[in-house]
């Protein structure tokens, strides 16, 4: 199951991690986000222990969304070493996200 990132734990869980983090910016009211959420959960299971994969709800955690300029949902950021190394905006097939994970592990 995907991790839950928040404004409070983002620095510790994502920015200070030595692993690649895949952060899905989502909202309960967003249809494409729900579809992508299932893919994020699958990827989290597939890469458990190797990659931090999780979701952050933009409605309850606005600080991180504003910091990274997230204006469209879903948006997935790939963060490594405290920096964004890749980005995906919009719902995409699982294979697209897997390629980005493999390129940045």
Image (cartoon, grey):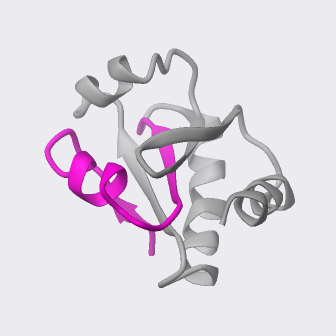
Q: Quadrant of the N terminus?
A: bottom left
Question: As rendered, which of 91 and 100 lies closer to the eye?
Answer: 100
Residue at 64%, 50% in the rendered image: 36
Residue at 47%, 67% in the rendered image: 19
Residue 88, horizontal then vertical, whole percent: 70, 36
Task: Please indicate whether residue 80 sits to the left or right of residue 82 in the image.
Answer: right
Residue at 35%, 54% in the rendered image: 14
Residue at 84%, 53% in the rendered image: 96
Position of residue 34 relative to residue 52, above or below, is above
Magenta segment range? 1-28
Quarter of the rendering containing residue 102: bottom right
Position of residue 103 relative to residue 64, above or below, is below
Residue 70, horizontal then vertical, whole percent: 48, 21
Task: Please indicate whether residue 92 sits to the left or right of residue 53 in the image.
Answer: right
Task: Please indicate whether residue 16 sits to the left or right of residue 94 in the image.
Answer: left
Residue 101: in magenta span: no
């Amino acid at each position: 199951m995907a991790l839950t990132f928040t404004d409070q734990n983002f620095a510790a869980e994502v920015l200070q991690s030595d692993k690649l983090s895949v952060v899905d910016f989502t909202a309960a009211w967003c249809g494409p986000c729900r579809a992508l959420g299932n893919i994020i959960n699958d990827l989290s299971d597939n890469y458990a222990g190797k990659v931090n994969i999780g979701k952050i709800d933009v409605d309850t955690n606005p600080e991180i969304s504003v910091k990274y300029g997230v204006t469209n949902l879903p948006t997935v950021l790939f963060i490594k070493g405290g920096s964004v190394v890749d980005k995906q905006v919009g719902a995409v097939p699982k294979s697209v996200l897997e390629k980005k994970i493999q390129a940045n592990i």
